[in-house]
Amino acid sequence: MLELIQFPFSPFCIPQRRLLEYAGANFKIINVPAQERARVWKLTKQKYYGVPVIRDGRNIIFDDTDDQQLVARYLDRKLKLGLFPAEHEGVQAILLRYIENEIQGAAFRLNDIFYRENNPADHQLQYLRFKERKFGRGCTDQWRAQKNEWLKKLENALIPFEQMLAHSEFLLDERPRFVDFDLFGMLENFLFSGHYSLPKSQPHLRAWHRRMKTVRVKRS
Ligand SMILES: N[C@@H](CCC(=O)N[C@@H](CS)C(=O)NCC(=O)O)C(=O)O
C-alpha cells in the first residue's frame, strides 16, 4: 500500500493527497508535525526533511527540487492519471511557478496568522520559531496586521484562473491536470483555518474548487 507522509495543512502535500483520492488509490496517511521531521529524515536516509514523501514498498519518493514535481510525476506514472500530457508541458511549467510563488506566498501567510489554532499547544512554540527563523521576528504578527492587503493580493493573483475557468471545467481542458491539483492545494491551505472563503467576485473559481474536492478519474 502507498504511504503519504504529510501534515494536514501543507500546501505541497494536499495536491498529492487529493490526487491519490482522485485516482481511487489504496493509500495510508502518516502525519508528522509541521515543524519536526525526524521521521522523514530517517525514512529518506538523511537525504531530505521536507514533505510530502511517498513510500511505495521499498521506493521512497520525494521532490528535492523547486520545480520538477517528482512526487506528482511518480504517482502520475504509477496510477496512469494523464496529469502531465506532453502538449501541456510548457504551459504547466509556467503556471506551476506562478501557483507555487504568487498564490502560495499569500495563501500560507494568511493561514499562518492562525498558527495557534492550526497546531496543538505543544507544537506552537517550535512552529513559531521555525517561521520566525525564516521570515524574521514577529512575522506572523506582521501578516495579521496586513491581513487585508494579503487577501487583496491573493484575490488579484487568482484573476487569471477565474478567467480561464470561465471557458473550461478545469484549468487547461475538460479534465484535471497537475496544475488543477497544485492550485487546489494552495487554496485548501489558505482555507484550512476556517476563517476565509474564496472571493465572491470569482464564481467560476468557486465552482471549480467544489468540483476539485470530489472529482474522480474516469477510466476509459
Ligand atoms: N518541491 C517540494 C516542496 C515541498 C515543500 O516545500 N514542503 C514544505 C512543507 S509545505 C517543507 O516541508 N519544507 C521544508 C521545511 O518545512 O523545513 C515538493 O513539491 O514536494
Image (cartoon, helix red, strand yellow):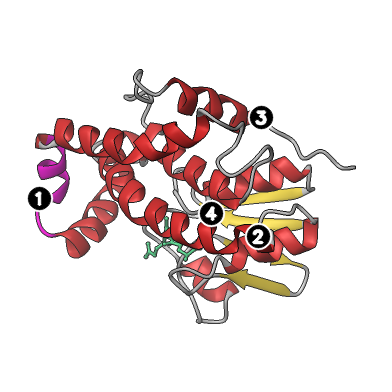
Reading the image, the residue beneath label 3 is 214
Residue 178 in picture, x, y percent from top left? 60, 52
- Badge 2: how crowded within 10 Å, few (<14), some, or many (20+)? few
Range of the magenta residues?
A: 136-144
Q: Are marks 1 and 4 in contact (CB under 8 Å)?
A: no
Quadrant including the N terminus: bottom right
> Could you tell which of marks 2 and 4 lies nearer the N-terminus?
4
The residue tagged with tag 4: helix, strand or loop? strand
Determine if residue 64 is in view.
yes
Q: Which residue is mark 4?
A: 6
Q: CA distance from mark 2 to mark 4?
A: 31 Å
Give the residue number, with chain letter if any, for mark 1.
138
Q: Which quadrant of the structure image shows residue 213?
A: top right
Residue type for callout 1: Gly
Q: Along the line of sight, which residue is nearer the eye, 175 or 76?
A: 175
The local secondary structure at tag 1 comes to: loop
Q: CA distance from mark 2 to mark 3?
A: 26 Å
Kind of residue indicated by mark 2? Glu
Q: CA distance from mark 1 to mark 2?
A: 45 Å
Upstream in sequence: badge 1 or badge 4: 4
Quadrant the C terminus occupies = top right
Q: Does 37 appear above or below 214?
A: below
